[in-house]
Image (cartoon, grey):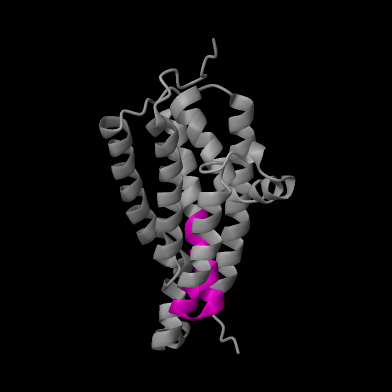
Amino acid sequence: MPRTWFNESSDSQWYLVPGLLAIILTMIGTMLTGLVLAREWERGTMEAMLATPITTQAFLLSKIIPYFMLGMLGWALCMLAAVFWYEVPIRGSFLLILSSSALYLLISLCIGLTISGRTRSQFLSSQVCLLASFLPAMLLSDFVFDLRCTPQWAAMIAKALPPYYYLQVLKIGFLTGEMYEIVVRDMLILTGFAALLVFAAHRQCQKRIRS
């Protein structure tokens, strides 16, 4: 008789809720900051900011910290719904879920800032953020489609994007526990993504006028 690992009763919400959490954090992170710099350029307030003595690091933090706190508040509400409403168990570590979520939210915020700084248009930035964040998180994170059943090229693209690794950590944190080799590997990969994207966002927040 077949046995289902980690979800003995085959409750669909145990699989869906972690995936929805990843998508919600993706949308919150990218859409919150995806319009920030573009709005500054469109309204002409960026030039006024460039005339102030503010440093690039301070400007970057001023754009990340408020939205990071807002995103973590949304994450907390999602966690409460997951545990007490949908009754998804936490068999692994709550600290793992928290730390990976904070890291992934930072990645999403930096993606939005980078796109916003490059496009300088709120409309264009919102469209690019949708394509660069929501669609990969939905289609290429192993949430909707099992990547083992997809073409090899699709699986390779998925493994080059942050949502895939975040969702793997979430599944371990909620349903599995242990599996420390996978956790360490995925957290290191997410840390690498975060460092790269913070650098990219930092470049977009530098005090210079681009043609």
- Looking at this rendering, what residue extends furthest in the top direction? 1
Does the rendering let one see residue 69? yes
Left or right of 70, for residue 42:
right
Between 90 and 64, the one lying in front of the other is 90
- Residue 204 found in image quarter: bottom right
Vertical relation: 205 (above or below) 108: below
Vertical relation: 45 (above or below) 189: below
**Residue 78: where, in percent of width, then height?**
32, 43
**Residue 190: where, in percent of width, then height?**
59, 45
What is the quadrant of the C terminus in the image? bottom right
- Residue 123 found in image quarter: bottom left
- Looking at this rendering, what residue extends furthest in the front direction? 1
Left or right of 16, for residue 150:
right
**Residue 206: where, in percent of width, then height?**
55, 75
Per the rendered image, the range of residues in magenta is: 107-125
Taking the spot 33% from the left edge, 55% from the top edge, the residue there is: 70
Taking the spot 52% from the left edge, 51% from the top edge, the residue there is: 137
Vertical relation: 58 (above or below) 176: below
Q: Main secondary structure of the magenta part?
A: helix
Between 141 and 203, the one lying in front of the other is 141
- Looking at this rendering, what residue extends furthest in the right direction? 152
Taking the spot 71% from the left edge, 46% from the top edge, the residue there is: 151
Does 112 appear in magenta?
A: yes
**Residue 181: where, in percent of width, then height?**
64, 27
Between 182 and 157, the one lying in front of the other is 157
